[in-house]
Amino acid sequence: MLIKSRRPWELPEAAATPEALFFNRRKILTTAGAIALSGALASCDAKSSAAVKTGTDPSAKFYPAKRDPLYKLDRALSPERVVETYNNYYEFGTEKEIYEDAQALPIRPWSVSIEGEVEKPFTVAVDDLIAKMPLEERLYRHRCVEAWAMAVPWTGFAMKSLVDLAKPLSKATFVEMQTFMKPDVASGQRQPWYPWPYTEGLTMAEATNPLAFLVTGVYGKPLPKQMGAPLRLAVPWKYGFKSIKAIVRFRFQSAQPKTYWQTVGPTEYGFWANVNPKVPHPRWSQASERLIGTEQRVPTQLFNGYAEQVAAIYKGMGGLGDRLYR
Ligand code: MTE
C-alpha cells in the first residue's frame, strides 16, 4: 500500500497548533452559548444544536438506559454540547468541527458482520443487535493521544456480550474491527494516502475485559453520527484512537490486526496504545491532559486510571517494554 507521509496540516491538533491559540479556540467553543458573540459564531452555535439531534433514531426507545453504579468518575462529566461538537473522525476531515459533515452518513439500514474464526459467520442488523444486548449507562473517562480528555456517560453493552454471541474458535486470539467505507459521503475517504477503512484491533483478553464497551448512545440518547453512530467502541484505558467509530465488521483471527494509525505512523501510534503518562509521544508529553469544556489541565494516570481493572492483562508482556504503552 502506498502511504504518503503526513504533511504539517495533517498533524494532530495538539502538535500542530501553538498551545495558546489552541486553548483560545477551545475557550471560544465552550462559552459560545453562554455569552453574546459575533453573528458568525452565534449562527455556528445554532447549527451545532441542530446537528446533534437524534430524535428520529429507531433505537430512541431504549434511552435512557439504567446507569451501572460500578463505573464512577472522579471528575465532572464534560458538557454535552462541547463533546458533541469537538470530534476526531478522519472520514469527515482532519479538523475537530466535523459534526455537520458527519450528518451525511446514512446510519439505517446498518449491518454488522461477524467474520473469521467463529463457529458460524453471520450478519446482524444493528437494531436487532441493540435489542438483544443488555444496555446500560456507564460513566467513563476518554483520553485522546493528542492530550485532551473528556468524561462521558456512554450507553451500550459489554463487548464480552458480542464475543459470546460470535462464538469465536480457540484459535481466535485477536478481534479486528472496521469502520464503513463510503467515499461518496465521507470526503476524508477520498484521500487515498490514508489506509481506509479505519481499522482497529484488540486481543481477546482485552475484548472480553468487563471495561471494553460497545457504545450505542451517549447522554441518555442515541449516539450522534459525529460520535460514531450507530455502534462504536469505548476502551477507556487506551488512547482514544482505539475507540473505533461506526463499526461494520468484527473479524476474529489469529494474527494481530494491522491498524489504521499504526499504518499511518508506526513510530507514534502503536497497536497497544495503553495510556501511560511516563511514555511521551515522540512529539509531545503525555504527563498531563486538558479537560475539554473547562480547559483544566490535570495529571494523566497509568491506564487512564483503570489500572486495577486491566493491568493484569499485560503481566508477562515485559518484553515489549515501553512500546507496550504507545
Ligand atoms: N473512528 C473512526 N472511524 N475514525 C476516526 O478518525 N478517531 C479516533 C476515535 N475513533 C476516529 C475513530 C480518535 S483519535 C478519537 S480521540 C476518538 O474517536 C474521538 O471520539 P469523539 O469524537 O467521540 O470524541
Image (cartoon, rainbow, N blue to C red):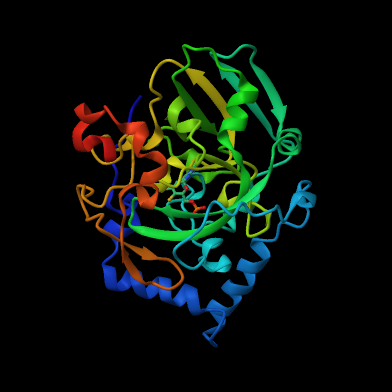
Q: Is residue 120 above or below residue 216?
A: above
Residue sitting at x 32%, y 66%: 298
Q: Is residue 271 visible?
A: no
Where is residue 22 drawn, in percent x and y?
34, 68
Residue sitting at x 43%, y 73%: 294
In this rendering, position of residue 200 left or right of residue 216: left
Q: How many marks?
A: 0
* Quadrant of the snapshot with the N terminus: top left
Residue sitting at x 28%, y 48%: 276
Q: Is residue 267 above or below residue 13?
A: above
Quadrant in which residue 124 is drawn? top right
* Quadrant of the snapshot with the C terminus: top left
Where is residue 68 drawn, in percent x and y?
61, 51
Q: Is residue 231 visible?
A: yes
Where is residue 208 drawn, in percent x and y?
51, 31
Quadrant in which residue 247 is drawn? top right
In this rendering, position of residue 69 left or right of residue 284: right
Residue sitting at x 62%, y 21%: 166
In this rendering, position of residue 40 left or right of residue 273: right
| 219 vs 50, nearest the viewer | 219
| 217 vs 195, nearest the viewer | 217
